[in-house]
Image (cartoon, grey):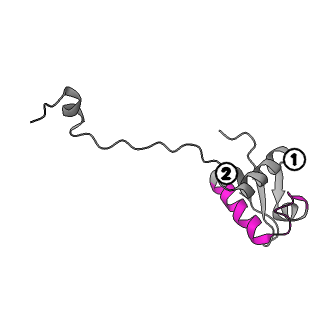
Amino acid sequence: MATMTIFDRLNRGRPAPVKKMTEQQPTSPLLEILLDWILNRWPHPTVTARDIYRSGPGPIQGRKGTTLSLTETLTRQGWLIPLKTWRRDKLEWKIARNRP
């Protein structure tokens, strides 16, 4: 029979510890390339999908589906904030450069 320590007795009714979520960082190389371009090379406070298609980083230019999925991921991570536009088919985001 194993002896029970004070710590075992104190932890008996306690729920399992919850792992804290660390700050999400880009996971794919294309995501890192796009985030670097938006934060360090794009001079404006907002960016549109068209800006990324036309003057974004080389591996992403002209790839509509890739660009949209990458911007969706950056939106979920808090780097981009969607803005309402005057055109229903225009996608524009505010860049969160000073993220907490």
State the SS at label 2: loop
Q: Is residue 90 left or right of residue 54?
A: left
Quarter of the image with the N terminus in it:
top left
Q: From mark 2 to mark 1, how far is it between C-alphas? A: 17 Å
Point out the residue furthest to the front here. Answer: 1
- Disc 2 residue type (three-letter): Pro
Q: Residue furthest left?
A: 1
26 in the magenta segment: no
What residue sits 72% from the left and 60% below the top? 71
The picture places residue 97, in percent across and down from the top left corner, at: 75, 43
Quarter of image, res 47: bottom right
User: What type is the residue that disc 1 sits on?
Assistant: Arg
Q: Tell me whether the residue at label 2 lies in contact with that at label 1, contact meaning CB atoms closer than 8 angstroms.
A: no
User: Residue, x 83% and y 48% (percent of image)?
Assistant: 45
- Secondary structure of residue under mark 1: loop
Is 41 above or below relative to 4?
Answer: below
The structure residue drawn at horizontal position 74% and vertical position 67%, both measured from the top left corner, is 66
Which residue is situated farthest in the top direction here? 6
Tell me where residue 29 sits by quadrant.
Answer: bottom right
Q: Which residue is mark 1?
A: 41
Residue 41 shown left or right of residue 27 in the figure? right
Q: Which label belongs to residue 26?
A: 2
Looking at the image, which is closer to me, 7 or 73? 7
Q: Nearer the viewer, mark 2 or mark 1?
A: 2
The answer to which of marks 2 and 1 sits earlier in the sequence is 2
Relative to the observer, which residue lies in front, 12 or 3? Answer: 3
Residue 99 percent across, percent down from the top left: 69, 41
Residue lying at 81% horizontally and 50% vertically, measured from the top left: 38
Provide the residue span drawn in magenta: 55-76
Q: Main secondary structure of the magenta part?
A: helix
